[in-house]
Image: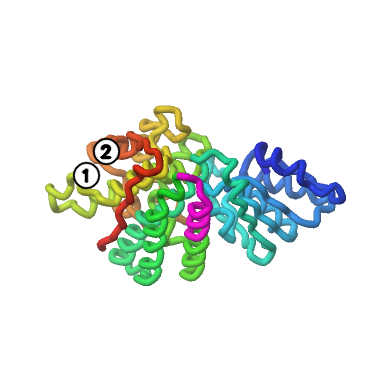
Amino acid sequence: TSDTPVRLVLDRVDPQHQAHIYKLHSLDLEQLTRDIEASKVLGVERVVGMGGGSVMDCSKMFAELLNLPLVLIPTVLSVDAPFTRAAGVRVQSGGKVSVRYMGDTAPRLESIILDSNVLRQAPHQLNAAGTGDVLSIVTALWDWHQASCRQGERWSPQISSDCLELVNKLLAAGSAIAHDSDEGYETLAYCFCEEVRLCEQWGNSRAEEGSEHYLAYCIEAQTGRGYVHGQIVGLCIVIVSLLQHLAACAHSDAMRDLDNCSNARLVADFFKQVEFDCGFGDQGNGNPTMQEVRGALGTMGEFVRVEKHLLPGYFHFYGSPGQDDAERVLKHAAVLLGSRIDHDGSQVSQVQRIHLQF
């Protein structure tokens, strides 16, 4: 667990049972492996993970390596980690940190417990961040379709359509998510579950993880900092949507106007509707600054060549964007994400459905 959930759970532990509390400090694989090995002397019978996405991943690693039953109690819905089989850990190699997905929790998982009263105690920003890990479908599907057209990669119109329906189901629940209602939590959890199910049905995370995640991973590697996953991914969705728009409209000067990129606009409008700040971190919201994102964009071509496990996407096909395009995209993303929507509940407008055209 982490500090805040500890305060929620300590007074609820049955005194007849002994609880060994492990407070997560890092998802570094080497450190986790050492800590898990050291815990073997404690005689633990069950792993209970209570916290956010990093805690979920840590708990899955404990259950995997100790071969113990697992119960997950997410205290925020900022990421799909409670619903995935694998654990996302950090691996250091050559002075760089990268993300690796390891293990299979399914044989050990006893239950996932979602309590709206617990979720509601978390800052709204953290629960709203979960929307970023669903809306990444928008840019991931573009990557997947491009890989199919360019390289003959297998493509499923049905899974693509089903995933896009999840995006639009989420968009329709904007008001509920903005008000931290049970309906909003249920919709977000449903989208996570279905997204994971569809990816497992296909055999990989092609439909929900693409260049938006790759850019986030590159930023993390370059800055050496951790970010709220859905928050940095939300920023990267808007940036990559704009880059994909420029690539798709390469032969039409009129369409290259970034104002014509409806996907980026609709995603940004939704983030504002649910009062989720995933703009650049220059204003202190915890996200990377524009300069940090600019630096990462300039190295993306090399990054995806080195990270060979990443499936082909925008940066594989087009490399790092040119300086002029990168600057246009960054400034336009700042405009789209920069202004907040103030409302009293009745003023929330419905965000339109997203229609992807390939």
Location of residue 330 in the rendering, given as x and y in whole percent from the top left corner = 30, 37
The residue where tag 1 is placed is 258
Instruction: Please give the name of the residue rendered at 40% of the width and 39% of the height, measured from the top-left corner.
Output: 344
Image quarter of residue 238:
top left
Location of residue 6 in the rendering, given as x and y in whole percent from the top left corner = 70, 40
Residue 186 in the magenta stretch? The answer is yes
Contact (Cβ within 8 Å) of mark 2 with mark 1: yes
Q: Is residue 46 left or right of residue 179?
A: right
Residue type at the position of mark 1: Leu
Residue type at the position of mark 2: His
Is residue 90 at least partly visible in the picture? no
Q: Secondary structure at mark 2?
A: helix
Q: Residues within 10 Å of mark 1 (few under 14, many from 20)?
A: some
Image quarter of residue 322:
top left
Q: Is residue 143 above or below residue 264?
A: below
The residue where tag 2 is placed is 332
Region of the chain picked out in magenta, as a range: 179-191
Q: Residues within 10 Å of mark 2 (few under 14, many from 20)?
A: some
Q: Is residue 180 left or right of residue 7?
A: left
Location of residue 255 in the rendering, given as x and y in whole percent from the top left corner = 16, 50
